[in-house]
Every structure is written in C-alpha cells, then in structure tokens.
C-alpha cells in the first residue's frame, strides 16, 4: 500500500536537510572569518623577571589591538607549570577591541606551595589569549610570556635547605657551646 503523502513528505524532508546544511555552512563560514581576526601585541614575547628572595611575583605592561573590531573580549592566561607559577592579566576584559590599543598588566606569581618549598625559581613560559565575542572564540596571535624567577628564599639560618647549601659549597661548621643558650659557628 502506498501513501499519497510520500512525494510531498520527501520534498519537505529534502528542503529541511538543505536549509540545515546551508545554515551549518554559513555558521562555519562566519566562525572561520572570525578566526581570521588577528591580535597585535606591542611586545611579543613579553619578559617577566623577578627574584624569589624579595618577592613572590613580577609584572610587565603590554598593549594590544585587533585587526577587526570585536566586542566584547576577555583575556585568558596560562603557564607551562600552573602548580608552581600562575599568570594573570589586569584588566581581564574589555568592552571592545579595535585599532585603539588596550593596555594590560601581566603578572606572574609563585604559588603558595612553590614558595613554601623553595621550588619556584626557574624558567617558565606562558600565554595570554584574547577571546571574543564569545568565550570559545579566541582570536589569532597569542602573547608569549617568558618568565624567569631567580634565586630562592632559605627557610631559616639553620634550616635544612641552608645547611645542605653549606655542605654543597664545601664549607664546614663547628658549633662550640659557649654556655647553655648560645652557640658560635665557625666557618672554614
């Protein structure tokens, strides 16, 4: 038994599939066109250098422009070792990005656990990406960040880390008791 609605139902189904395909093609085109927007940074790569002996963070300023106006934009930052060092951007959002430079401050910070254990000193990399107008549409040309953390804090004058550094430097210490409360350290 055949249905009289067969050709008409098929025609509607074909039209529906065609309109979905055209819609998907158009959204693919617009997403591809949006990804062709390029961000230009005034300094790229950006260098951040600080000493863990005197601080747990360091900052550097930069600015960026967009090849085509995009609104709004958010900045996302990440590092190569997020358990040791973090990267943040301030401000992290702008109402629009266009040919007028937007100024930011990028800050690298040692994590609390890396500071406590003395493992923060080292060389790291990071990136800052401009995303917009939606959070999943990121624009081309990320900012590369080179992070150098120098030195380290010793946990105390007689801490384990300090004593091991003295041993590594081939220093010898003799503690001589002067009385029950005071000690004199001779280094030779």
Image (cartoon, rainbow, N blue to C red):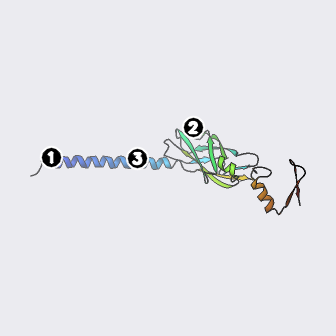
Helix, strand or loop at disc 2?
strand
Labels 1 and 3 touching (C-beta < 8 A): no
Between 65 and 171, which is closer to the camera in this rendering?
A: 171
Helix, strand or loop at disc 1?
loop
Image coords of residue 107 (percent x, y): 66, 44
Question: Which residue in the protein does label 1 denote?
Answer: 5
User: Which residue corresponds to the image point at 80% horizontal and 61% vertical from the top-left?
Assistant: 167
Q: Residue furthest right?
A: 178
Looking at the rendered structure, which numbered label has been put on residue 27?
3
Q: Is residue 90 visible?
A: yes
Q: In the visual, does 181 lie left or right of 76?
A: right
Labels 2 and 3 touching (C-beta < 8 A): no
Quarter placement of the C terminus:
bottom right
First of labels 1, 2 by sequence position: 1
Between 40 and 144, which is closer to the camera in this rendering?
A: 144
Image coords of residue 146 (percent x, y): 67, 53
Question: Which residue in the protein does label 2 denote?
Answer: 94
Helix, strand or loop at disc 3?
helix
How many numbered marks appear? 3
Q: CA distance from mark 1 to mark 2?
A: 55 Å
User: Which residue corresponds to the image point at 60% horizontal and 43% vertical from the top-left?
Assistant: 65
Image coords of residue 147 (percent x, y): 68, 52
Q: Using a 10 Å C-alpha cutoff, classify the residue at mark 2 as few (fewer than 14 neighbours), some (14 to 19) or many (20 or more).
A: some
User: Which residue corresponds to the image point at 25% horizontal and 49% vertical from the top-left?
Assistant: 14
Q: Using a 10 Å C-alpha cutoff, classify the residue at mark 1 as few (fewer than 14 neighbours), some (14 to 19) or many (20 or more).
A: few
Q: CA distance from mark 1 to mark 3?
A: 33 Å
């Amino acid at each position: 038994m055949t249905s009289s609605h067969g050709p008409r139902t098929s025609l509607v189904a074909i039209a529906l599939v065609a309109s979905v395909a055209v819609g998907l093609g158009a959204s693919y085109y617009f997403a591809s066109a949006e990804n062709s927007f390029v961000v230009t940074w005034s300094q790229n790569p950006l260098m951040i250098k600080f000493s863990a002996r005197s601080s747990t963070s360091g900052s550097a300023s930069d600015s960026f422009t967009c090849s085509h106006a995009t609104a709004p934009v958010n900045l996302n930052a990440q590092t190569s070792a997020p358990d040791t060092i973090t990267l943040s951007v301030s401000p992290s959002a702008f109402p629009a990005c266009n040919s007028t430079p937007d100024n930011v401050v990028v800050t690298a910070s040692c994590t609390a656990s890396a500071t406590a254990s003395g493992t923060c000193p080292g060389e790291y990399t990071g990136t800052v990406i401009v995303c917009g107008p939606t959070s999943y549409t990121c624009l081309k040309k990320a900012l590369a960040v080179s992070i150098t953390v120098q030195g380290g804090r010793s946990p105390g004058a007689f801490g384990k880390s300090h004593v091991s550094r003295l041993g590594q430097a081939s220093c010898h210490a003799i503690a001589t008791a002067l009385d029950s409360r005071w000690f004199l350290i001779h280094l030779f």
